[in-house]
Amino acid sequence: MEALMNTKLYCPIRGLLNVDEKDKSGLSFTEERQRIELVKFLLNKKKYPKELFQFEYIIKIGTSNQKLRADLVIWKDEKKEKVEIIAEVKKNGKHKEKAAILQLEPGKKLLNAKYGIYFDDENNYLLYNNDKYSITKLPDYGFDFDSKKIAINDLREINNIDSLYSKLDQLAHNKGFSKEKRYEGIFQVILAKYYDEKYNSKNLKFISNKNTFKNFTDLYTKSMQYYNISSQIELNSQIILSEDVINKIVEVLEEYSFMKSDIGVIQTFFMKFGANFLKKDLAQYYTPIPIIKFIASLIDVKSNNRIIDPAGGSGDFLVGILEKYKNSDTFSLIKENLHYWDLSEDALKVAFINMVLHGDGRTNIEQLDSIERFDYKNNSFDYVITNPPFGSKTKWDGSNEIMKQYKIVENEKANKELGILFIERSIKLLKENGILIIILPSGYMNNSSMSFIRNYCLKYRIIADISLPPGAFKGADTGVKTDILIIKKEILDKDYKIFVEAPKKIGFDFKSNKLSIMYKRDEKTGSFLYDDQNDKIIDSDLTEIENKFKKFTYDNSIKGFEQKNNDVEYSTVLKSQIVNDAFLTLKPELYLNNYVKLIEDINQKGAVSLKELKQQNKCKIVITNSKSIELVDEKEYTYISISESKKGYYSLENKMRSWEISQIDRAKQKAEENDIFISYLYGSKDKFFIMTEKDADNIVVTNGMYKIKIDDERIRLSFYIFLFTEYFSKQFEAFATGHIQTNINIDKVWEFKFNILNDEEFEAAKKMLKSQIEWKNNYNEFNNF
């Protein structure tokens, strides 16, 4: 889809309009936005020619000066002598009845139009011979009413799933059905609806007519027989909801297609409906839609390829494959080759509903312990895509005899972390040249204590390591920083390139609890940017990374992945660079092109590190964060925590007695004049300062910061000024490791590259520090006053 990057609406007939998507309140769509949705429906679904559309058509009422204005009319033919369709559009359903009585119905009568349409994107209907129908009943251009069966291509995608969900629930609630019965009944409706879209796609039965309830009953009976084959949920043969409720729900749903709707829309419905239906919090099963789509976009699945998720959870990665290929000729074959394993009975139920909502539900679902069944179906799959449980608390509790089968922990017998074991289990499942895509904690790839994991992975061909931002899986109640690791089950003797990336933006606000979708905005005005379908453009680096990866696989002729010879640059690291590292560290941020260039730039300016300066005996340098304070009973101290410092500033307002200080585990470090303190946490890399108090005997600093003593003033101020620059921020990001609290090791502080100030810069730095001290003194005096 072409991204026009415009802040206004685009009409497929009139072009770019000077109209916003939302009204002045920012809460509702404008009528123009809704009119364009109707235009797209008539153009794309019903094939009415552009030349027959006329907007804002004036209708004269008799011989008087009174007039009606039609939002849209469509002429019968190019002669434009007779109106075929008149449409009244509203931004919402608030004035639906009034619009029909005062505008649509009299307008249709005055023009003697064959059809009338009311449209607000939710309460839409077709008027024909004074009867109301779903707008899907409008015949295609050139056809008569009821001359053509309603097919799935006549249906619209769902835009506002929240509103639709609430409407279904309210219809059942109004008739007194309990919450439990409502959701069981709605699930029956969904099964029937999906079955109809799947097997009656050219002649749909899920429509509102005189036989609505009978048709629905027949559909549900057939769907129950179909889904019962692999259903993880006991399906009730009795229809739960009453006939009048079923009729109304069918009336609401008949114009929409679940199977054609976006995966994000269906996931929203799934997270709400599934939670109520199963009476479970589904947060632990949450996988971000942008990541699901991204992973599916990378691989080139053939009809005979077998795909498995051996730690299936909600089945989201398999759903991603279904979504990618749902309009493909090979869809039915690909669908049959999807396999799902999970130990949890609850997970199987969640996955079953998720699969149903994405048009399947009969995937090869098995309940089993993938780790225990270490040799089950080995060498059987072309792709393994998985996000296994990980972390020090997620340990496998099986026998030591089975653990002997896992070579990845051969020298780490005490380590039974599931995330680690699933790496080997997944590779064993693959055929020769099969592909593994696995979500892992970043620490697996860069913590020095976990080099044994990289050592195992390097036995095979590592295709890519993509470092996701912290919080990417916050919706699953985990703040663990993760990577997407891609491995091909082949052994290469020669050196090769590994694709590396580290997206900053992944399409949603992972820093907030709401995890709201983030859209591109105009930098000057803040207005949202739209594509040619008037959809807001998601603000994500993943699309760009997808294109880079396709170019990488094209250049390196790597089969099994999508390839594209596009004009983009990408970042790589050689396997030999990883192997030659003492800890086999695989950290994408260290090898990104922009970071490599940054280091080259600073090195060209004569950059040095603290380690080099110490080796050259240029000055005395000490770095520590160990205990260095001995508390004196009853003495008052000032405690500086990480939160009480930022970009050179520190607060002296946190006064405590020695006994209070002693109860704070991190309050360990003595401060002296000219000591530089920097936080070692990635999320607090802007927390640093230089101690300017001449008498600092009563100041205690957290050991969550490294203390750096440099006895040469020029070098000390050079390093301090460096902390304010992008050079520091980028190096900190590249050096930071771990996945729970991403941080830099003390050894890396010695490796920061910075430039020594020249005479002019040195004098300016001294003046800046002097001003900083004066400002602090003035502030303290004012505060004390």
Image: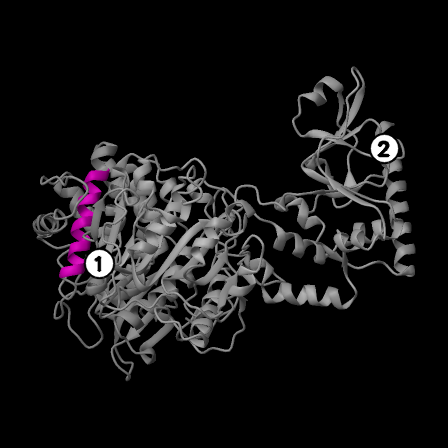
Asked if residue 9 is positioned above or below residue 189 in the image, the reply reads below
Answer with left or right where residue 414 lies relative to residue 241. Answer: right
Q: Which residues are magenta?
A: 183-199
> In the rendered image of this protein, does residue 765 appear above or below residue 156?
above
Mark 1: secondary structure? loop
* Disc 1 residue type (three-letter): Ser
Provide residue 66's location: percent of width, then percent of height: 38, 65
Query: Measured from the top left, where is residue 378 in percent x and y?
Result: 26, 54
Nearest the eye: 579 or 743: 579
Badge 2: few (under 14), some or many (20 or more) residues near its Cα, within 10 Å? some
Q: Is residue 292 magenta?
A: no
Q: Answer with left or right where residue 121 lies relative to residue 704.
A: left
Q: Residue at x 87, y 35 (%)?
A: 693
**Residue holding disc 2:** 780
Q: Give the quarter of the image for residue 504.
A: bottom right
Provide the major secondary structure of the magenta segment: helix
| Residue 193 included in the magenta stretch of the image | yes
**Any mark on residue 199, and which?**
none
SS label for mark 2: helix
Q: Is residue 545 left or right of residue 698?
A: left
The kind of residue tagged 2 is Asn
Task: Determine which residue is flagged by label 1.
Answer: 134
